[in-house]
Image: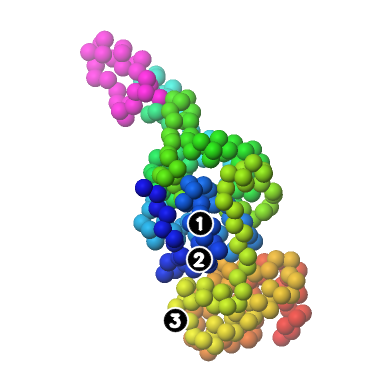
């Protein structure tokens, strides 16, 4: 039975109302949820935290420049198949000579499924109500999302060589989350198979709630000063403004110090290398906050 309860987050993850609604719609309809937004806004964390909170198996596929459907669905191990074929011929000779046959791990060449290695897509479809993350699909070649259209439309994968089909019903469809940083525009037909949501960057009030999820014991003045400086940096027109991920890494660093010392580091603008990721941006910061 489909897991369509309205999920609003967990102890360690804050899922805002609009994102929770989109995720609920996608799971109810048995469709993938495509999440776009700038890097570091928590797109990847949604399926990870949902699977962890609900105790569901999680399958992940980090997309890259060489990603293809074979990696995502399944690969046929031709080398192992050839080796076992040779072992079978050799065993026939050994049996004729009264010798014990060699072991092949219980595989039989007439059963082609023994040589198919399932990728995260086929594994997720084999585990109803699991969670599947396709991360940063915009980094993959354009053919990759196009090649997924059949699977998304028919809710099934056809395994290589054996021709076996792995399919699920709409109710048993895994919770699929696909993330994109918009490095390239995705095919229209592919986006049409998904429920779409864009994560806007959180305002200071929401950021405070996010921080408290990760650092529930953070001291008030430290929280106030770190958020103020963080949004000052984001408002400076940097080439790459710091994201939520950098904010949390920065606070994790400051957590190693006593509160007064951590606040002093904020006032001195120490640890900017955690927030700022380019030489030109660092020079802007240094000129705006001279020692």
Q: Residue at x 25, y 11 (%)?
A: 97
Left-right relation of 182 to 158: right
Q: Work out whether residue 187 or residue 239 is closer to the camera in this orientation and state it.
A: 187
Name the mark on residue 15.
2
Q: Residues in magenta? A: 88-112
Q: Work out whether residue 154 or residue 90 is closer to the camera in this orientation and state it.
A: 154
Name the mark on residue 23.
1
Q: Residues within 10 Å of mark 2 (few under 14, many from 20)?
A: many
Q: Work out whether residue 168 or residue 246 is closer to the camera in this orientation and state it.
A: 168
Left-right relation of 4 to 248: left
In this view, 175 is above or below 214: above
Q: Is residue 31 visible?
A: yes
Quadrant where the C terminus lies? Answer: bottom right
Q: Residue at x 36, y 15 (%)?
A: 89
Q: Position of residue 219 (x, y in %)?
A: 49, 85
Label 3 element class? loop
Q: Residues within 10 Å of mark 1 (few under 14, many from 20)?
A: many
Lower sequence index among marks 3 and 2: 2
In this view, 282 is above or below 110: below
Left-right relation of 233 to 47: right
Does residue 290 show up magenta in the picture? no
Residue 221 falls in which quadrant of the image? bottom right
Q: In 3D space, how far apart are the residues under numbered discs 3 and 2 (Cα atoms)? A: 20 Å
Q: Work out whether residue 256 or residue 32 is closer to the camera in this orientation and state it.
A: 32
Single out the mark in the foreground, 3 or 2: 2
Question: According to the image, label 3 marks what residue?
Answer: 217
Label 1 element class? helix
| Labelled pair 2, 1 in contact (Cβ < 8 Å) | yes
Q: Position of residue 101 (x, y in %)?
A: 27, 20
């Amino acid at each position: 039975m489909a897991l369509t309860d309205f999920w609003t987050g967990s102890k360690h993850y804050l899922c805002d109302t609009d994102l929770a609604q989109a995720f609920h719609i996608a799971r109810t309809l048995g469709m993938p949820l495509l999440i776009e937004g700038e890097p570091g806004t928590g797109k990847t964390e949604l399926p990870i935290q949902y699977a962890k909170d609900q105790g569901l198996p999680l399958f992940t596929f980090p997309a890259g420049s060489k990603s293809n459907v074979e990696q995502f669905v399944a690969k046929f191990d031709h080398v192992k198949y050839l080796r076992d074929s040779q072992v079978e011929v050799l065993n026939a000779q050994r049996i004729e000579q009264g010798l014990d046959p060699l072991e092949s791990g219980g595989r039989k060449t007439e059963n082609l499924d023994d040589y198919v290695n399932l990728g995260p897509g086929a594994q997720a479809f084999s585990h109803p109500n699991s969670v599947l993350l396709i991360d940063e699909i915009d980094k993959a070649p354009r053919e990759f999302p196009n090649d997924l259209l059949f699977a998304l439309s028919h809710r099934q994968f056809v395994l290589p060589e054996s021709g076996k089909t792995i399919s699920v019903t709409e109710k048993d469809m895994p919770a699929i989350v696909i993330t994109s940083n918009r490095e390239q525009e995705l095919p229209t037909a592919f986006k049409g198979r998904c429920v779409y949501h864009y994560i806007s960057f959180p305002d200071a009030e929401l950021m405070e709630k996010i921080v408290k999820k990760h650092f529930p014991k953070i001291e008030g003045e430290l929280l106030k000063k770190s958020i103020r400086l963080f949004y000052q940096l984001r408002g400076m027109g940097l080439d790459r403004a710091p994201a939520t991920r950098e904010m949390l890494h920065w606070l994790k660093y400051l957590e190693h110090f006593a509160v007064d010392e951590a606040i002093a580091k904020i006032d001195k603008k120490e640890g900017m290398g955690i927030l700022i990721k380019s030489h030109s941006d660092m020079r802007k910061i240094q000129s705006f906050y001279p020692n």
